[in-house]
Image (cartoon, rainbow, N blue to C red):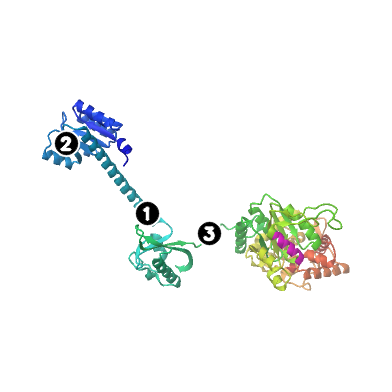
Amino acid sequence: MTETATTEAAILIVDDEISLRNTFSIFLKRAGYATVIAVGSFEEAVKEVSSRMFDLIICDIVLETHSGIELLRRFRQLGVTCPVVIVTGYPEVETASEAVRLGAFDYLPKPVEKEALLKTTRLAIRQYRLEQGKREAELARERYRHFLEALFKSVSDSIISVDHDMRILKMNHAASVLFCALQPELREGDNLHSINQKEELTQLTDNVAKVLKTGIELTDHRVELFLGGTCKVLSICISPLDNGTGQSAGAVLVLRDMTPKKQKASQKRNHFHKMLGASPAMQKVYLLLENIGRVDTSVLITGPSGTGKELAVHALHQESPRRNRPLVMVDCTAMTDTLLESELFGHKKGAFTGAEENRMGRILQADGGTLFLDEIGDISMTMQLRLLRFLQEKTFYPVGSDKELQVDVRVIAATNVNLKDKVKAGSFREDLYFRLLIIDIHLPPLREREGDIPLLTEYFIGLFAKKLHKKITGISEQALVHLCRYEWPGNVRQLEHAIERACILCQGTTISSADLPDEMLGRSKIDRPQTIPEIGVTAEKSGNHPRLFTPTDEDKQTTEKILAALKKAGGNKAKASRILNIDRSTLYRKMRELHIDADMFG
């Protein structure tokens, strides 16, 4: 203990002789003790120790009204723990033994010499400070022990300590719960080998033995373990147990349950952004879109035509941090290679015939936002290579330019074909396929969306009744049964078109079976009632009623050609227009006029 710490102590002098009080005070202050308080009576001494703490009390054995022994006894009643030095001119055995019993530190016989006073003061204060430090250390250790015990009991990780014979020294509550399915009666004192009932646990005990033998810690060893009928993933750390002297007393096992927590069942949703449906299949899709939308990586959306891939793209974009940036959509099948390359990457003026000015490509337009590449499975091998380089580097060259541009774009691709089959057939690059397949979302066909058809039907009836200015309020039970039994090769888009057609044909407030297409009623054209038009109805009206028409031979020939092209293109209108060598807008117009539904081709 330093001299400074000693001289900073507070000292109380109790003596009824003023000359002795002053002499002691002068000696002690000159020795460097800054706080020295001197009083002359029993009452004053009690008052002082009741108001502040002292490191030493020097008290005369004889006071005017009381003895020093009485004062010492009173100090102990008040809880005073500092040393007390008794000053006396007549030491007696009985007085000495009583003083010692009450905790007096020492005697100073009168006359008190200066050096004896200062030496006794130093020793008393030093010992008091040492005892204080010891008590504080013990209290700290006790608090730390209680803290460790509370931590050991409450921590969620399972903790087991074993000795060199693998006897369990200590285990917390979490460990008892973890292993209760294997060994309900496992307790402290049992051997760790008693849980050795599974191959995974055999490996665990082998690892403990290895750590006990080598003293080398094993960290983050992860195993799958079936406990209580469920598969748990445990991260296991095994460390040597130090007994505090550097010697090994055994090993400590810490087992952390890494099993993914089951998400609380989210409230059933009947829509998500622009997507509609309450079926279990769509609930999974909503959850995927919600989680994947937040992750800024490429996404591949698969599923048959008409399942709502564009709506899924909108949902992903809205769920992403890029929601306030552009969403640029590109139909990869609507353009030739040259046009698609220019459309995506842009071009420099004069790059090719017809390039009369610089053009910003769709990729650059989407900078900071999202780029959607629809029907990516139909692009050529040349374009696949260019896209692959762009996806890998996020850089590109506009057509006719030697200046490289860099963009920050999230790419979402979609296809209704099986890209894996195309890879096997050699018509789609495998490296591009895996680059796109970082995360994939499959949209289920309508026939797998149990219970969604009534919901979608109600929505489309409301939509088209308002659009056509009709007071249609619902659909008959029989008609709805037909819709629910139909296979829907064209999925939601086909249902939308069927309800639009039914709303056009409906003469009252309720859609009936007669307003539905024949294929949805399970009838052939031969069985079709004469009141139903062969092709459909035109958009022309006579008064408030749709006008039926009889198709001409030319209409029939055109219908057959369009149907054949659509069948060959699998319902893809962009492909069908190229097969027919006509503009896509012309194909759309002819299909509306002849009431041809491409969705039936899937």
- At label 3, counting other C-alpha atoms closer than 10 Å, the crowd grade (few under 14, some 14-19, many 20 or more) is few
Q: Is residue 381 magenta?
A: yes
Residues 154 and 17: in front is 17
Q: Report which residue position mark 2 lands on.
A: 69
Crowdedness near tag 2: few (<14), some (14–19) or many (≥20) residues, C-alpha within 10 Å: many
Specify start and end residues of the magenta stretch as a single range.
380-391
Q: CA distance from mark 2 to mark 1?
A: 44 Å
Image depth: mark 2 or mark 3 in front: 2
Q: Nearer the viewer, residue 143 or 580?
A: 143
Q: Position of residue 582 (x, y in %)?
A: 85, 64
Q: CA distance from mark 1 to mark 3?
A: 32 Å
Task: Name the mark nearer the viewer: 1 or 3.
Answer: 1
Q: Quadrant of residue 450?
A: bottom right
The quarter of the picture where the N terminus appears is top left
Indicate the quadrant where residue 295 lies: bottom right
Q: Nearer the viewer, mark 2 or mark 1?
A: 2
Crowd band around label 1 with a 10 angstrom C-alpha radius: few (<14), some (14–19), many (20+)? few
Give the residue pinned by disc 3.
Answer: 263
- Does residue 154 appear left or right of residue 315 in this picture? left
What x and y, as percent, mark residue 367?
A: 71, 52
Q: For this rendering, which residue is in front, 66 or 526? A: 66
Question: Quadrant location of residue 154?
Answer: bottom left
